[in-house]
Amino acid sequence: MPQMTGGQALAKQLHLEGVRVIFGLPGVQLYHALDALHDEKD
């Protein structure tokens, strides 16, 4: 079974909740989350 990263879990949950817009300041701490958000299908 493939492992899910924290960024992928965050992106999946935001998608399930219907979140369409996210505001924030990108930084090295968020790179994995931002990558997962980018990869999440609409």
Image: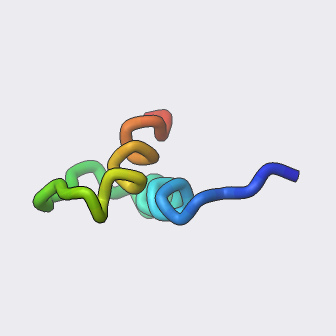
Q: Position of residue 14 (x, y in %)?
A: 42, 60
In the picture, residue 23 is in which quadrant? Answer: bottom left
Q: Position of residue 2 (x, y in %)?
A: 80, 50
Q: Position of residue 40 (x, y in %)?
A: 48, 40
Left or right: 15 in relation to 22: right
> Nearest the camera: 16 or 11?
11
> Nearest the camera: 29 or 11?
29
Residue 42, above or below 15: above
In the picture, residue 42 is in which quadrant? Answer: top left
Residue at image point 47% right, 63% down: 10
> Nearest the camera: 30 or 17?
30
Residue at image point 53% right, 65% down: 6
Left or right: 31 in relation to 2: left
Task: In the displayed orientation, state which residue is furthest to the right.
Answer: 1
Task: In the displayed orientation, state which residue is furthest to the front.
Answer: 28
Residue at image point 30% right, 60% down: 30
> How many marks overall?
0
Q: Position of residue 25 (x, y in %)?
A: 11, 59
Q: How is this picture coloured?
A: rainbow
Residue 13, above or below 20: below
Left or right: 18 in relation to 5: left
Left or right: 23 in relation to 31: left
